Amino acid sequence: MSSMPATQPDVAVISGGVGAARFIRALMTAIDPTQITAVVNTGDDTTLHGLAISPDLDTIVYTLAEAIDPERGWGLVDETWRAMGALDRYATIRPDGSSAAPQWFNLGDQDLATHFYRTARLAEGATLTEVTNEIRRAWDVPVAVLPMSDERLSTMVTVTADPDAGDQPREVSFQDYFVRLRHSVPVTSVRFDGSASLSSPARAAIEHATTIVIAPSNPLVSIGPMRALTGFDDLLATRRERTVAVSPIVGGAALKGPADRMLAELGHDPSVVGVARLYRSIASVLVVDPVDADLAPEVEAAGMRCVVTPSIMSDPDVARGLAEQTLAAVVS
């Protein structure tokens, strides 16, 4: 069994994928990376080609290892796709109704090695927490990276039209919605399938952190799965005064992904005020970009103290400044 980091973190980051990864990378320039623990959403996890795939965990590890593809924001830089291309051979002989050899979810040739390793270790009886720590160490990432749970909890999305179902409404997995359907169809509901709890290491990270940051991730499908874990909201409520959230919405729009559209489609205000209403029971401060400074009174009326600072991580100085201001927001 691989050893877990022995020291408790000073900062626990409640994390989704790309936005969280970029924020943690900025945080690494502001404080000692060994003081940071990422508690990461696994509601997006899926199984394809018989392989256990953890998209958010891998995005964070690859980003912090400076190995992420900078244009896509996911997968590895200088990736090749020969294995996926070779699946074309089987497309014509696959029986109707078979899910074999799917090509809608791209797995790069180098990236496959991570999934091979994870799948084999899980089959040997290792927990996802143990395997993630091994993968982190293999990539020389100094930040502790923890899956939210070692139990399965899956994000399910009801969409209004699915071409594979004759454009009828149906419930699909998050990856079906996000990748196969390119998050291009409206959503009518989000459900979390399964009953799971925070892993013991993830709980300890949150309990002992000096500061807890809710990263700029989709509140509904990146942070939402963690909030569906048994006792998660109750735990964060006890740490509310030490918890600060960074808004993923800037000027009414998501910087990446469908968060703004999903908020509107599911009846929430797609603004920093809507984010404040979602987080006010678990965080005391919301960090917003200057473009939303005029909404600061409404954020505070919603129940959160508002800190205004540049939050679009367009260059290293802005990113570091965001990290520093976020940490300073809950300093006594």
Image (cartoon, rainbow, N blue to C red):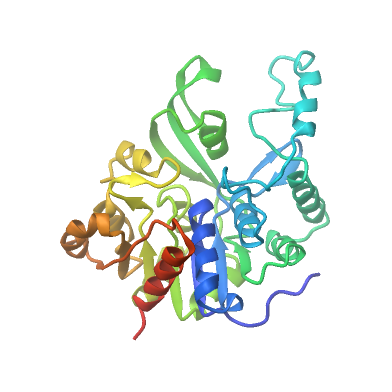
On screen, residue 189 above or below 161: below
Q: Position of residue 234 (x, y in %)?
A: 40, 68
Q: Describe residue 162's horizontal placement relative to residue 309 as left or right.
A: right
Comparing 33 with 187, the one in front is: 33
Q: Describe residue 138's horizontal placement relative to residue 171 as left or right.
A: right
Residue placed at 41% from the left, 48% from the top? 220
Residue placed at 76% from the left, 27% from the top? 85
Quarter of the picture holding the C terminus: bottom left
Quarter of the picture holding the N terminus: bottom right
Residue 92 location, quadrant? top right
Q: Position of residue 217 (x, y in %)?
A: 44, 54
> Does residue 205 appear anywhere in the picture?
yes
Q: Position of residue 169 (x, y in %)?
A: 44, 23
Q: Position of residue 111 (x, y in %)?
A: 73, 46
Comparing 218 with 188, the one in front is: 218
Residue 144 location, quadrant? bottom right
> Does residue 203 appear anywhere in the picture?
no
Comparing 22 with 272, the one in front is: 22
Label total for image: 0
Name, please, the residue furthest toward the bottom.
332
On screen, residue 127 above or below 255: below
Residue 215 location, quadrant? bottom left
Residue placed at 54% from the left, 58% from the top? 21
